[in-house]
Image: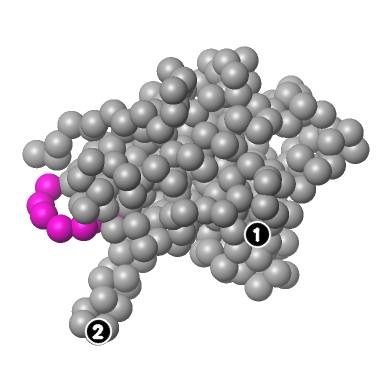
Amino acid sequence: MTAAPVVHAYGPGPDQFLELTLPDGDGAAPVVVVLHGGFWRARYGIELARPLAADLAARGWAAVAVEYRRVGAGGGWPTTLDDVAAALDALPDLPGADRLDLSGITVVGHSAGGHLAAWAAGRGRLPGGAPGARPRVPVGAVVAQAGVLDLAAAVAADLGDGATVAFLGGTPAEVPDRYAAADPARLLPTGVPVLCVHGEQDTTVPLDQSQRYRTAATAAGDTVEVSVVPGDHMAVIDLAGEAWRRTVTWLTARRSAASDRTTLES
């Protein structure tokens, strides 16, 4: 049976913690970090990430569910970004870090968590002094589940009733430097493969968000796959649904390819 998750603080605040669930067995396991969504707002929390993390650990990954400060509880610009960066960079210092293969972690995120996952992949392009600059742990792959991946377009469409403006403290015209540092569509190319899984009937974060990101990323030379599935905004985190099956299949194929490379190199 998979071990119970262990809670680790990466900061002093009550929302600055992660939950690590290790798979059965010995040796270093591939790592998947799960970032929950909720339009960066405080009323949505890590409970949305826990079922996904538990399922991944049962399938052989070291799963990390992350809580972070959100708008309404000390989050927003720049603290939400600082927290996600700090959580990822804390992984090498966790007790039992020898069980973690940190050579290229995968970050899975839903909705606003998809934004944070894609943003994490672009941290290496950030200038010094920007939130999240100089990453310590490399991101090797991203799964964006109905992700908010083009922040300027999200503002123009008023997704989440002003959620992006509340998150960054203004519009692109008012705080352009913040959008430059926080918008995944403006941190390309990352060199990181991305799977965008999106519900065809999603009206909360429309499919256009994933399509826009793919267009921009492809033009920059990155590899982005958009997988359209039946269902709404929450269908992509339904463990019994088609979207999660496609996500696990993609993750498994990457894990197998990495294992084959390791075998050849040894």
Q: Is the magenta stretch mostly helix, strand or loop?
A: loop
Magenta-tinted stretch: 24-30
Query: Residue at coordinates 44% horizontally, 28% vertically from top-left?
Result: 11
What residue does disc 1 label? 125
What residue does disc 2 label? 264
Up-down relation of residue 39 to residue 240 (above or below): above
Report x, y in % for residue 85: 52, 43
Report x, y in % for residue 14: 43, 18
SS under mark 1 = helix
Query: Residue at coordinates 32% horizontally, 45% vertically from top-left?
Result: 93
Dot 2 alpha-carbon crowd within 10 angstroms: few under 14, some 14 to 19, many 20 or more = few
Quarter of the image for the N terminus: give it.
top left
Query: Residue at coordinates 49% horizontally, 28% vertically from top-left?
Result: 68
Quarter of the image for the C terminus: give it.
bottom left
Residue 9, image quadrant = top left
Q: Is residue 21 magenta?
A: no
Which amino acid type corresponds to the residue marked 2 in the rendered image?
Leu
Seen in the image, is 249 located left or right of residue 85?
A: left
Disc 1 to disc 2, how far (Cα)?
Answer: 31 Å
Seen in the image, is 48 located left or right of residue 162?
A: left
Report x, y in % for residue 29: 23, 56
Q: Which of 224 and 35 is in front in this view?
A: 35
Query: Residue at coordinates 26% horizontally, 83% vertically from top-left?
Result: 265
Which amino acid type corresponds to the residue marked 1 in the rendered image?
Arg
